Amino acid sequence: MLDWIGSLRVRESTERRVVLSISRSTQIVGVLLLALGIYAGWLTWPVSRWLAALPLAVGLLGLLLVTLRRQLVFDREAGVLRVDQSAFGLSSRAVVPLFHLRAVVIAARGDDHPDGLRKLVAPRRFVAYVERRIGGAIYLDEAKRCANLMPLAEAIADVAELRLEYDNTSHAS
């Protein structure tokens, strides 16, 4: 239901470069949660400090969403992938040469429990990631429908000249 919070979107796409970043709706939801949490915490504080903890925790979650930043730049001319991430003002940056990347993968997760019981607990999801030759995979996004991830994966595969792999077999997650 809330797949769009924190999801990557294609911000800029040319023949030589793709820029992915978190959707603006993430920050909007963060501002709303922050305001709601502070207001509800302010109202409940005189009644009980313990009761005010829950709305303030919601406000803290909103603050996280407001400060959350993630940008991936696939640049064919420079031959690199730049990954910039930050939350609460703490940032990390990485530069990965494109020749270290193997493929863009969309894989199915969940839905593998006998008797179909897993569908009740964790329905099938699709995960998009960039597989590396050296090191762990670079997580991109996940969604309930594969169609939501395909434009993202196709744009990356075209610019970075990577294979696009689709794994529809379920794996335990």
Image: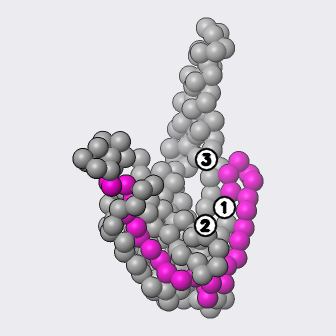
- Residue ID at (52%, 38%): 32
Q: What percent of the width, then of the height, locates residue 53?
A: 63, 22
- State which region is magenta: 86-112
Q: Nearer the viewer, mark 2 or mark 3?
A: 2
Residue 95 on the magenta segment:
yes
Residue under pointer 2: 71
Q: What percent of the width, then of the height, locates residue 57?
A: 61, 30
Residue 39 on the magenta segment:
no
Magenta: predominant secondary structure element? strand
10 Å crowding of disc 3: few (<14), some (14-19), many (20+): many
Give the vertical position of 63 relative to 11 (above or below).
Answer: above
First in sequence: mark 2 vs mark 3: 3
Q: What percent of the width, then of the height, locates residue 19?
A: 55, 74
Marks 2 & 3, CB-CB < 8 Å contact: no
Task: Please name the amino acid that badge 1 sits on.
Answer: Gln
Q: Is residue 33 visible?
A: yes
Viewer-nearest residue: 151 or 12: 151
- Residue ID at (33%, 46%): 118
Viewer-nearest residue: 108 or 55: 108
Give the vertical position of 15 relative to 57 (above or below).
Answer: below
Residue under pointer 3: 66
Task: Please name the amino acid that badge 3 sits on.
Answer: Val
Q: Secondary structure at mark 1?
A: strand
Residue under pointer 1: 85
**Distance from the alpha carbon under mark 3 to that under mark 1:** 13 Å
